[in-house]
Amino acid sequence: MTVSKADTELHTLSVDADYACEEERFYQTVLSHRNQLYQIAYSYLRNKEDALEAIQEATFRAWKKRKTLKNPAAFKPWIIRILIYICIDEQRRRKRISPIPEQMPEPSVQLDHRRMQMLSMLEKIKPKYRHILLLRYYNDMTVPEIARILDKPEGTIKTWQHQALKQLRKHMDKQEDWYNET
Amino acid sequence: MKHDVEQMLKQDAEQLRTEQPPAGDFEQIRAIRAGMQQPARRTHTLGSVLKRRSSRVVMSTAAAVMVIAFLLAGVNQWSPLFKTAALSEEEQQANDNWGDLEPFRELSSHMNIYDSLNSAIKNNYIQRTNTSVTQNGLTFTLHALTADRQKIIYFFTIESQENLTVMAPSISRFISPDDRHVISEGSSIWGGAFPENPRLYKGMGMIRLEEGQAFPHKMIGRFQLRTTKIDFLNHHNLELKKSDINITPIFKIPFDLAPQFSLQEPKIYYPKDVVYKWSKGTLKVTKVELSPLSTKIKIVLDPVAAKSDPYPVFPNLYLLAQKGGKRTPLDNRSGGNSGGTADDGSFEIEYEFGSDLLSQPDTLQIALADGQKHTLKLR
């Protein structure tokens, strides 16, 4: 039986079982967190397609950087952290796009006035504080969970949460509409 | 006045959860799978919003930078053209039917190739191969394909007769049966087996042909497949061990490509007066290239504007192919386009859209989001 050059090359290139196994285990692990990943991405981006794209990108980056994760038990906070960075990048990119008024897209979901203001307020506070509020209130995470995701001591998270609420309240106080509506 | 901000946040979060559109397993699995396969896609490119596609543009060596033109979601009320072009994917695809290839339609619905495949199927520019090879309890079927001078897109399934979960092929390679040279090392593949039937993997693959490469009329596809007895799609907590994954011997799938695929030369236009006034400068369309499976539009931002903003975020572009009274929006669904600084200081970007060349359109309308539009006569 002769073996063609192409066959030889193909076998050389064959993905070995270790790699395949690692790939599948990684895939399964991401899959098991998919609902939470989606909810987090959605809370940042408020758009289904963007949220799914962010998950896709997070999966790619996590797979690429998997060797840097020393503790497999920390996979979940690790990939959530990656996802959050992607969402932040996307939010920054959105800010860079300043459409002229007639190009301003219609929001896909009609938000009521109060919700638009909340969104606007959240964008005004410091990013590190915004993370706390989004993870704590929009994703029902506990302080220890957030601490693991952001890789900070729990005390820091509690301080940040306090500061976040304080900043948010301050911005709200400046908005006349809040007085009228609350 | 003191606000109970915690309460307000909780109410807002509750409201957000109520309005949050559910993402089905299919969509989430697809996103994760695509993430795993992305390195190949970055090379061979199917594109997607957060993934950037590379393409050949004239770049100065010093100033070559990548830029992205992003989609601005939404519908502008001022321009009927924009409104038509910005119809949701669901609206555009509501009446499409791919017949025997319908199971593959959803796989490509968010991809740039959707419009091209839709046009190919509508115009019978599809070659049914229905070539099957069975070995080791697995059947690989190459159902159909379509091609032009730049790419080959194929539709395939892998089915297990032994109740095994079919995983993505680990290798795909295409060689010439005549001299055994490698036509394409790998291809972009997207697809998957799904929880309702883990035994069946549905997929589509795309082979990029190099510029100047002779069109391959005959090929042998070589695939290495993987299966597992673990039903991980339905039981996410199951541990998959090395010994659970079975890697098959190489499947060899010979097939011919219909002569029609090599006959259709790209139609290239160099319009002289397609110019748009944009907030950052002047945009000029310098080249429009129509192939059966893609439409490429090259746009240049004037040197002065390019100098003032080295990383311009280009506006969204909309394309309508028109034939008689019928208008077909062609989507730049992936939103990722690439470009670079040219030797004269201008900034050049290439958008890639789907194509409806096969329907022999009379004109192509190219519009910006603010309603500025130009019509390019094609006949």
Image (cartoon, rainbow, N blue to C red):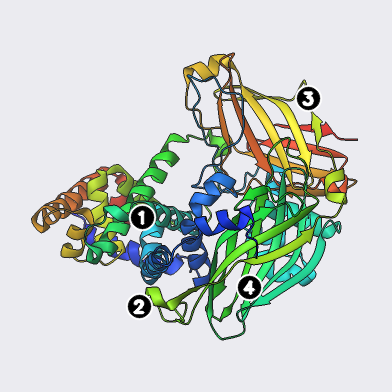
Q: Amino acid at mark 1?
A: Ala
Residue at mark 1 shares a chain with residue at mark 4: no
Label 1: which secondary element: helix
Question: Which residue lies at the image location 70% right of the left edge and 47% below the top edge?
Answer: B85
Report in which chain the residue with disc 1 lies: A
Q: Nearer the N terminus, badge 3 or badge 4?
A: 4
Q: CA distance from mark 3 to mark 4?
A: 46 Å
> Closer to the N terminus: mark 3 or mark 2?
2
Q: Is residue B327 above or below residue B299?
A: below
Number of the front mark, 2 or 1: 2
For residue B135, above or below residue B86: below
Find the distance from the CA under tag 2 to the CA under tag 4.
24 Å
Q: Nearer the viewer, residue B115 or B93?
A: B115
- What secondary structure is marked by label 3? loop
Q: Is residue B277 left or right of residue B377?
A: left
User: Which residue is tagged 1?
Assistant: A62
Residues A52 and B279: in front is: A52
Q: Amino acid at mark 4?
A: Ile
Q: Which residue is mark 4?
A: B158
What residue does disc 3 label? B271
